Amino acid sequence: MNLFFKKLVVPNEIIYQILLVLEEEKKVLTNLRLANKSFFYTISTHFLFNKFKPKCIQSLQNFTKTLAEFKHLSTLVKEVSFSELTPRWTEVTNSHVIELAKVLPELISLDLEMCERINDSAVQYIIENCKMLEELTLNDCIGIN
């Protein structure tokens, strides 16, 4: 399959399918090319992990591991939101958020609403390592001072 994205907004479904292929089959998509690296891609974790609801945390770990292994895909993700997810996401910890920030240093928007188990150290790591971050939502994060 030859995927060539050319000056258009790629639907989340396509990005989702790419990540599924990488995660489940561990294939390298050598034919993935980007015509313009300034594209803005948004992946909602609600949409991305909807298929994996019983294994939400494991899916988050798989997602960050996949992006770490295939760094050229990590540049596609500019926005991550936990705000629409079910209460299972109250299990997201500092280590999950820090790993996400490590593999997505070009994030411009991160919504951690209701991630109750994160604290100031995770927020500090995000601020120091995601230099392009413009928006950080921390509503109802009870571990943040």
Image (cartoon, rainbow, N blue to C red):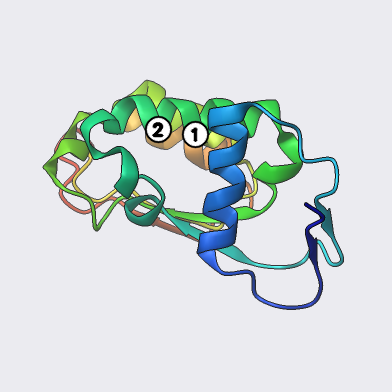
Instruction: Decide which of 2, 109 is in the foreground and name it.
Output: 2
Instruction: Name the residue carrying label 2.
Output: 60
Q: Is residue 30 left or right of residue 82?
A: right
Residue at coordinates 64% horizontally, 67% vertically from top-left? 40
Which image quadrant is residue 30 in? top right
Q: Is residue 89 above or below residue 55?
A: below
Q: Is residue 127 left or right of residue 141?
A: right
In the rendered image, residue 1, in percent from the top left (x then y), is placed at: 77, 52
Amino acid under disc 1? Phe
Q: Is residue 89 above or below residue 69?
A: below
For label 1, the SS is: helix
For the question of whether residue 130 can be seen, the reply is: no
In the rendered image, residue 82, in percent from the top left (x then y), is placed at: 31, 50
Disc 2 from disc 1: Cα separation: 5 Å
Say few, some or many: other residues with alpha carbon within 10 Å of mark 1 (under 14 / 14 to 19 / 20 or more).
many
Residue at coordinates 53% horizontally, 41% vertically from top-left? 20
For label 2, the SS is: helix
Q: Is residue 1 above or below residue 13?
A: above
Instruction: Decide which of 134, 10 is in the foreground and name it.
Output: 10
Residue at coordinates 55% horizontally, 31% vertically from top-left? 23
In the rendered image, residue 110, in percent from the top left (x then y), is placed at: 43, 52
Say few, some or many: other residues with alpha carbon within 10 Å of mark 2 (under 14 / 14 to 19 / 20 or more).
many
Amino acid under disc 2? Leu
| Residue positioned most to the top | 95
In the rendered image, residue 19, in percent from the top left (x then y), is placed at: 57, 43
Specify the label residue 63 is tagged with.
1
Instruction: Decide which of 50, 106 is in the foreground and name it.
Output: 50
For the question of whether residue 49 can be seen, the reply is: yes
Quadrant that contains the C terminus? top left
Residue at coordinates 84% horizontally, 67% vertically from top-left? 36
Mark 2 in CB contact with mark 1 (< 8 angstroms) = yes
